[in-house]
Image (cartoon, rainbow, N blue to C red):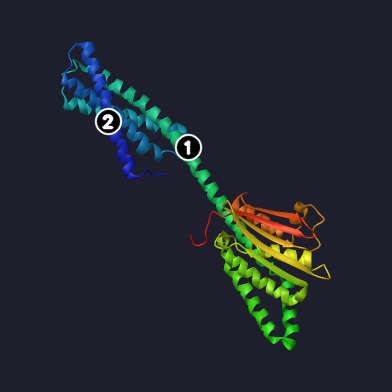
Amino acid sequence: MKRPVRSTVLQALIWLAGNSIAGAVIGLAVGFFNTGVIEQPTIVISVLFGNVVGFTAFFSASVLFPRLRLLARPIRVLLLGFTLLTGAVSGSVAVLYAYPLFVVRDFSQIAAIVAINGVLSVIVGAIVFVYENMRFKLEASLREVQEVRLAEAHLREAAARAELAALQAQINPHFFFNTLNTIASLLEDDPETAEDVLHRLAGLFRYAFKASDAEPVPLREELEFTRNYLAIERARFGDRLSVEWDIDPESTEVAVPGLLLQPLVENAVAHGIAPRVEGGHLRISTRLVDRTLHLDVVDDGVGIDRRQEEFVRDGHGLGNVQRRLDSVYGGRGSLSLLNHPERNGTVARLLLPADRIAGG
């Protein structure tokens, strides 16, 4: 991964400061222990030698190392070693040429200085090389983790869209054909009601397609969609179906996944009320309690005679709702099926976080 220019410049300045401080300390130590006198030229040369060693290592690590990663390790080590030695020797010779030999007495001393700088450069370069190698592997690991997380997010989004498409199918062919039969039966005796049912059916499909983008919608839109759905069902069931609404006004702007309420209502009508000859009563209520949306669909139908988990798993649209809750809320949303506390019937209860307001 290519480093930003600003980052490279900052690192170079940090290296310059570190090299200069280390060189100055060495120059002070050499002057003090050698002659007992601290000479400015000695400190200057020590600072220059420190930067020769330091910048040779820095150049190899930041410029050369990234370009050699794809090579075999032996070749990479040889090239880095050669670069470090060459840079240290060339830099040391340049410093000694610029400051003629007032600190050296013969050629052997010059060779010793150059050799020491070369060895120091290789040692420092090896340390930097190991550090850069570890940093590169850590960055690669972090990138992989980020890519995995991104892939998981895309999969969750795709799953949510697939679940939503499945829920759209809950406005299923049976309901569609039942509605058409209802319209046909009403055309002769009650054409106005037939026209109203037809308009409501069109509205259901418009909303279903609108909700297909998997974006949250205000609860009020879900409630309006459900009202239209129940209006059609009441046209079919007549007096066998009565509906009661108990809506907390503060809850209507809470953002919820689209097409979440209708499967609960459809399940209550189809599996709770429809099997009873006399029909039944449906009550839909919402409450906001401690930043949690409580949404109940209560029927006085035949009830459930199996464990909740089995009923949800077997379908009836409820398993689909539970999977979407898990996908959207990650365990913070729940669907419960309870026996009616006072009589036959079922309570389908949604508990959803109310931390998002539609449009907010």
* Residue 46 as seen in the image, left or right of residue 250: left
Disc 2 element: helix
Above or below, comparing residue 227 to residue 303 in the picture: below
Of residue 148 and residue 88, the one placed in the foreground of this image is 148
Please determine whether, in this image, residue 172 is positioned above or below residue 192. above
Q: Residue at x 16, y 22 (%)?
A: 41
Q: Which residue, given by chain and number where applicable, does mark 1 sit on?
A: 138
Q: Nearer the viewer, residue 164 or 185?
A: 185
Say which amino acid is labelled 2: Ala
Q: Quadrant of residue 234?
A: bottom right
Q: Amino acid at mark 1?
A: Leu
**What quarter of the picture does the N terminus occupy?**
top left
How many tags in the picture? 2
Residue 86 placement: quadrant: top left
Determine the residue positioned at 21% across, 27% down.
95
For residue 17, which numbered disc appears in the image? 2
